[in-house]
Image: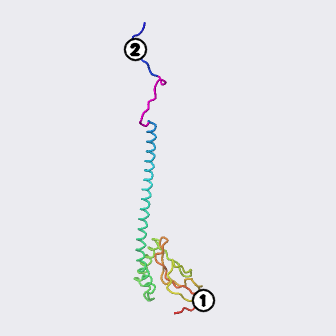
Amino acid sequence: MTDDRDEIRVPHEEDAEPVESSEPGLEEQLETAQQEIEQLRDKYLRSLAEMDNYRKRVAREREQQQLRSRMELIRQLLPVADDYGLALSHVPEEYAGLAWIEGLALIYRKLEQYLSGVGVEPIEAAGQPFDPHYHDALMREASDTYPEGIVTEEIRKGYMMAGEVLRPTLVKVSMGAGVQHEE
């Protein structure tokens, strides 16, 4: 007996004809998308790095500006400290033990401690070779003690802060032994 049902024929892969499409295949689309993702990821990482560098640069510039401001304030304070120290060094003997002189000396020591605490360091000059980066020569003098080019005396103390000269030391410089200064 035959069955009246229609047979359904399932095509096999061998029977199928290749379908050609003018649109790129899924694999090509996937590869293109992955390349685009990689490019966007690279741009994103570069942007993050640029932003991080920008923040660091701004922070460095801010620190430098704060340091310059502090240094300028201290430059203006140094002559006051010099005058204070000079005045205390010229107090007559009969006033040396008075309480108000002791109070002035205490204030001067606090000022020196403050300067030291913010990183202000004196420039050592006496007995050192003259260096125009650290010293300002006010005069030259003959010296039997020091050879030519050596600082013989500090006239005004110089200071440094954060590796920079706040104010050079005013000095006298030796011309060597037996040389007379021509005036």
Q: Residue at x 46, y 37 (%)?
A: 27
Find residue 71 and report its image quarter: bottom left
Q: CA distance from mark 1 to mark 2?
A: 131 Å
* Magenta stretch encompasses residue 20: yes
Residue 177 disc label:
1
Q: Where residue 59 sits in the image (x, y, percent)? A: 42, 62
Classed neighbour count for the residue bearing mark 1: other residues with Cα under 10 Å, few (<14), some (14–19), many (≥20):
some
Q: Marks 1 and 2: CB-CB under 8 Å?
A: no
Q: Amino acid at mark 2?
A: Asp
Identity of the residue drawn at 45% across and 22% down: 11
Please identify the quadrant where the N terminus is shown.
top left
Q: What range is drawn magenta here?
A: 12-24
Determine which residue is flagged by label 2. Answer: 6
Q: For the residue labelled by badge 2, is the local secondary structure a helix, a strand or a loop?
A: loop
Residue 36 x, y percent position in the rendering: 43, 45
Closer to the camera, 35 or 70?
35
In x, y percent, where is residue 8?
Answer: 42, 17
Residue 32 lies in the magenta-colored region:
no
- Label the magenta part by its dominant secondary structure: loop
Q: Residue furthest top?
A: 1
Does 168 appear above or below 39? below
**Which residue does the image show at 45% across and 47% down from the upper left?**
39
Which image quadrant for residue 66? bottom left
Relative to residue 63, is residue 39 depicted above or below?
above
Q: Residues within 10 Å of mark 2 (few under 14, many from 20)?
A: few
Q: Nearer the viewer, residue 29 or 155?
A: 29
